[in-house]
Amino acid sequence: MASMTDFRRVADDVRNWGRWGDADEIGTLNFITSEKVAQAASLVRHGKVFPLGVDFGSSGPQGAFQYRPNPMHVMTIDGGDASTLAEYGPQWLKNPVAAQLGSYADNGPMRFNDDMIIMPLQAATQWDALSHVYYEDKLYNGFPASSVTSLGAFHCGIDKVDGRGITSRGVLLDIARLRGVETFCELGDPITPAELDEAARSQGVTVERGDIVLVRTGWWARFLQTGDGSEPGAGLDWTCASWLHDHEIAAIAADNLMVEDPVSGIEGAFLPMHMLCLRDMGLMLGEYWDLNALAADCAADGVYEFQLIAPPLRVTGAVGSPVNPIAIK
């Protein structure tokens, strides 16, 4: 078990504050240049598309955590309303919604359905914004944590990264396949920097500046079997933060619930890699990505690089966002 002294030494080493100027709010996404985007597009050779997002529904993984309930999907207008509103709506003046909808139905054959969703922005496949995690009252690049108010994040919100689009060369590192596990990497054996290197070597792929690295632990495959969103599995050891910094990647995502290992590795600290990546490095984390079909195809053709497109929703001041990323080969 490492100490907070060890943590602070690594934090000082990986911190990117001021690297792209004192006003920067997108961190390592600065590594995604126009040349990098063009390189990613050149990787599309067969037109194969792999959706990496999971379902946003009542059976999702976040139901195991009470502070993040699963999405609630409700219909606001449906087919059952049509005939009734056409008959009663226009005269129901004390209910302006019914009156308005009834007038639509009374003026011709057109009918429609509408719905809405109520959910945490990090309810399923998602990006963590740089304002999501902080410590010692500072966000990434030294912005004050107090700038995140009940109205949202003034600094480092998810809306600040949308101009980048988040599209780059994606690289899959299949740790589950490297370990030869049948389903997923079980808790108690965190993923090390050496394993990330070994996965890249065994797959014949090189991790380059500006890449978005996807790590498959097999956790999502396990969840599909059990439906237990609370079952922990192995993630990246906190020391992988230095590996991510040294490779100058743009972002990282995984198929598990927190990218990093649930066992801290730092005495007295919870989620140390979140602190190092989001607050110190300015590196966004993606969670609950479904990498199963992509991993199977990569294993079949031996190609572990692809174009990755994963823009967040531009929710003003949000500290995270749902995403439906796609990989194209």
Image (spheres, rainbow, N blue to C red):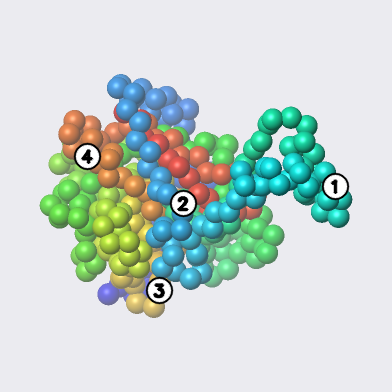
Q: Amino acid at mark 2?
A: Phe
Residue at the image point whose x is 40% and y is 36% from the top: 326
Q: Is residue 266 above or below residue 47?
A: below
Query: Which quarter of the rendered picture does the N terminus lie within?
Result: bottom left
Residue 53 x, y percent position in the rendering: 41, 45
Which label sits in the foreground, 3 or 1?
1
Q: Which mark is residue 269?
A: 3
Along the polypeptide, which appears first: circle 4 or circle 2? 2
Quadrant assignment, res 192: bottom left
Please give the residue where the numbered disc 4 appears in the rendered image. 296
Return the residue at label 2: 56
Mark 4 neighbour class, 10 Å CA radius: few under 14, some 14 to 19, many 20 or more: few
Whether residue 21 is visible to the viewer of this picture, yes or no, is no
Under mark 3, the amino acid is Ala
Q: Secondary structure at mark 4?
A: helix
Q: What residue sits right under mark 1 in the picture?
A: 91
Indicate the position of residue 262 as horizontal and vertical percent values: 33, 67
Mark 4 vs mark 2, foreground winner is: 2
Q: Residue 130: x, y in percent?
A: 52, 54
